[in-house]
Image (cartoon, helix red, strand yellow):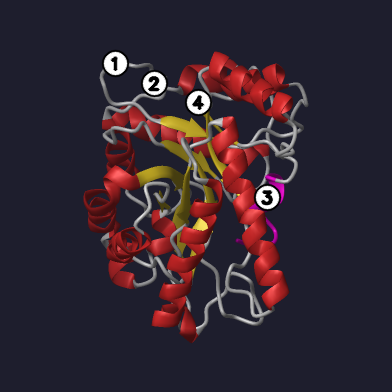
């Protein structure tokens, strides 16, 4: 969530993405390991300067080596356009992974909190209409300084109960038939661990509620940083059947006199991508893995190439 990066919270409004650097480059297309076994991953990410035409946008994702996409900003009332995007992406066999609705469901202002709730309800309705895997938001924060920032009450029973109530309200308002609603994991709010994710899912008690996995967001201690393989396996062991979308990034430790982890391009950090890719590929629901938080086309190209190479080593394909 760094301001100097192109992140999904900024580009989802206009689907800012990635045609700027050599869309049809065979370097990208040939780098992806082809299907050689039952293990495969749908890698996705943004497309820069996206064409407005649904067919061209879907094709642009394939030219980037992507088999999954963030949802375009489609008006919920435009049913014909929604169907056009759904059909176009289906023809290219590109899954629409997520509708992001990045608002604070715990906002202290009651009017703003209600408006944010309505924004997420609209997002879940769009996800269900277009055939996306999920609509995702964070559970929210009690912080008065940052809509997603840390606060001591974020670990409270009050936060947990509000997270459950909000999820139920969103799902019950839409009654989705295809998409799930889920909270992205955070290291300083519910759900802050695999076990916390399971607890929320059981408490919400709705078929329309799923799990969203971002392992870098769960790494909030040296133990988890150094032994993230165990964290990955725990996440998939406990949440696997509910995981509907995943995020791909990496984490490095910037050494100073206190703890400081920093998001970096995949391959420049310490996340065990061999284990991550193998576990994603084994999910029965063919869960997409979405690149995020990178700065420009060059960084996304580096990330794709690293993940393709890591997949090849791990016996995972992307076709």
| Depicted 270 relative to depicted 274: above or below | below
Q: Nearer the viewer, mark 4 or mark 2?
A: 4
Name the residue tied to disc 1.
36
Sooner in the amino-acid sequence: mark 2 or mark 3:
3
Name the residue tied to disc 2.
33
Q: CA distance from mark 1 to mark 2?
A: 8 Å
Sooner in the amino-acid sequence: mark 4 or mark 2:
2
The picture places residue 164, in percent across and down from the top left corner, at 43, 66
Sooner in the amino-acid sequence: mark 1 or mark 4:
1
- Say which quadrant the N terminus sits in: bottom right
The residue sitting at 70% across, 59% down in the picture is: 4
Sooner in the amino-acid sequence: mark 3 or mark 4:
3
The disc at residue 67 is: 4
Name the residue tied to disc 3.
6
Q: In the visual, does 81 lie left or right of 301?
A: right
Number of residues whose C-alpha sits closer than 10 Å to that of mark 3, classed few (under 14), some (14–19) or many (20 or more): some
Q: CA distance from mark 2 to mark 3?
A: 27 Å
Q: Nearer the viewer, mark 1 or mark 4?
A: 4
Local secondary structure at mark 1: loop
Q: Are marks 1 and 2 in contact (CB under 8 Å)?
A: yes
Residue stretch rendered in magenta on the structure: 1-12
Splitting the image into 4 quarters, where does residue 130 fall?
Answer: top right
Q: CA distance from mark 4 to mark 2?
A: 13 Å
Number of residues whose C-alpha sits closer than 10 Å to that of mark 1, classed few (under 14), some (14–19) or many (20 or more): few
Q: CA distance from mark 3 to mark 4?
A: 21 Å
């Amino acid at each position: 969530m760094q301001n100097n990066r192109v992140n999904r919270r900024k580009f989802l409004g206009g689907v800012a993405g990635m045609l700027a650097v050599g869309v049809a480059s065979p370097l990208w297309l040939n780098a992806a390991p082809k299907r050689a076994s039952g293990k495969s991953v749908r890698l996705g990410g943004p497309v820069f300067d996206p064409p407005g035409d649904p067919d061209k946008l879907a094709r642009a994702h394939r030219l980037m080596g992507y088999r999954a996409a963030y949802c375009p900003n489609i008006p919920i009332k435009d049913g014909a356009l929604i169907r056009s995007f759904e059909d176009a992406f289906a023809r290219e066999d590109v899954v629409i992974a997520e509708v992001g609705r990045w608002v604070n469901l715990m906002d202290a202002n009651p009017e703003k909190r209600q408006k944010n709730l309505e924004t997420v309800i609209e997002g879940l309705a769009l996800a269900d209409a277009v055939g996306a895997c999920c609509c995702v938001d964070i559970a929210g924060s009690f912080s008065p300084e940052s809509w997603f920032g840390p606060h001591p009450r974020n670990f409270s029973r009050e936060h947990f109960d509000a997270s459950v109530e909000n999820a139920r309200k969103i799902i019950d308002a839409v009654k989705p038939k295809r998409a799930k609603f889920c909270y992205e994991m955070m290291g300083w709010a519910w759900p802050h661990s695999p076990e916390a994710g399971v607890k929320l899912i059981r408490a919400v008690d709705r078929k329309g509620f799923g799990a969203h996995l971002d392992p870098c967001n769960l790494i909030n201690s040296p133990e988890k940083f150094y032994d993230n393989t165990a964290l990955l396996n725990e996440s998939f062991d406990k949440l696997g059947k509910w995981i509907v979308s995943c995020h791909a990034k990496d984490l490095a430790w910037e050494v100073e006199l206190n703890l400081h982890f920093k998001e970096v391009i995949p391959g420049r950090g310490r996340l065990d991508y061999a284990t991550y890719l193998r576990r994603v590929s084994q999910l029965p629901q063919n869960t997409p893995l979405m690149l995020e938080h990178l700065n420009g086309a060059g960084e996304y190209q580096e990330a794709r190439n690293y993940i393709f190479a890591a997949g090849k080593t791990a016996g995972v394909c992307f076709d």
